[in-house]
Image (cartoon, grey):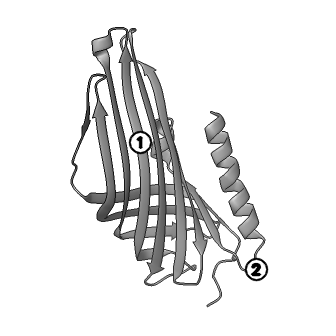
Amino acid sequence: MKKIKLLTLVLCMSVLSFSNTVNAQIDATISPIGLLFGNFDGGVDFGISENMSVEVGLGLQFGNNNITGDTDYKYFGLPINVFGKYYLNPNNGADKFYVGAFAKFVTRSYSIDGDNSNNYAEYSNTRFGVGFGLGYKIVSNGGFVFDINFGAGRAFVDKNKFSDGDESVSIELPGLMVTGKLGIGYRFGGGSRLSK
C-alpha cells in the first residue's frame, strides 16, 4: 500500500511541476482494468506540439495470496514504458489517431511457497525492448481523456529464470515485446489546442 501511495505522489508531483510551464498540456491516465485486480498502471502524456506527445507509463503490480491454506503465492511486477506519439489529424491538440514508437522495461517475479519443501517454485523475468504501435485518444471539451493503444516490437534483453529449490533453469522465450493500454483520465493545462 505504501508503494501505491508513493507512486501516486510521484505522478501527481510530475503533473503539477509540468502544469506550471507555459502552454503545458498533460494528460494523466490510469487503467481501470488494472485497478479491478489491485494493480496500479498509470501514465502521464506530455504534449510537445499539436501533433506530438511523449507518454511515460509506470505500473505497480503485486499480489500476496494464500491459495490452499498451506501454500502462499506472491507476485511483483514493475513495467516502465515510454511511448512517443505522432497524431495524424488532431482536433484538440494531441488527440485522435496516432502512430508511434515505444521502449519498454519490465521486471516480474512469482513465487509459490508451501509447508512442504517440495512445494516451492520461483520464476523471475526481466525484459527490455523497443517497437512500434498505434492508438486512438479521445479528449472531451471538459478535459476527460480516453486513450487506447497497442504496440509490438523486439526484446533486446530477455532474462527468464525458473527455480524449484533444487535447481535453476534459464528459459528461452520468443523475442516478441508487446505493449498495450486502455486508460481513462484528465487533461491538465494547454487550453484546447497547443501552440504550433
The residue indicated by pointer 2 is 22
Q: Report the Cα–Cα distance between label 2 and label 1.
A: 39 Å
Q: Residues within 10 Å of mark 2 (few under 14, many from 20)?
A: few
Residue 146 as seen in the image, left or right of residue 16: left
Residue 106 as seen in the image, left or right of residue 59: left
The image position of residue 177, as x and y in percent, is 31, 59
Residue 102 as seen in the image, left or right of residue 177: right
Q: Nearer the viewer, residue 106 or 29?
A: 106
Total numbered labels placed on residues in the image: 2
Whichever of callouts 2 and 1 sits on the residue coming sooner in the sequence is 2
Q: Nearer the viewer, residue 88 or 48?
A: 48
185 w.r.t. 133: above or below:
above
The image position of residue 164, as x and y in percent, is 28, 25
Quadrant into which the C terminus falls: bottom right
Q: Residue placed at 66% from the left, 73% from the top?
A: 25
Q: Quadrant of residue 143?
A: bottom right
Amino acid type, label 2: Val
Q: Residue placed at 43% from the left, 83% from the top?
A: 88
Q: Which residue lies most toward the front here?
A: 167
Element assignment for label 1: strand
69 w.r.t. 159: above or below:
above
Q: Which mark is residue 108?
A: 1
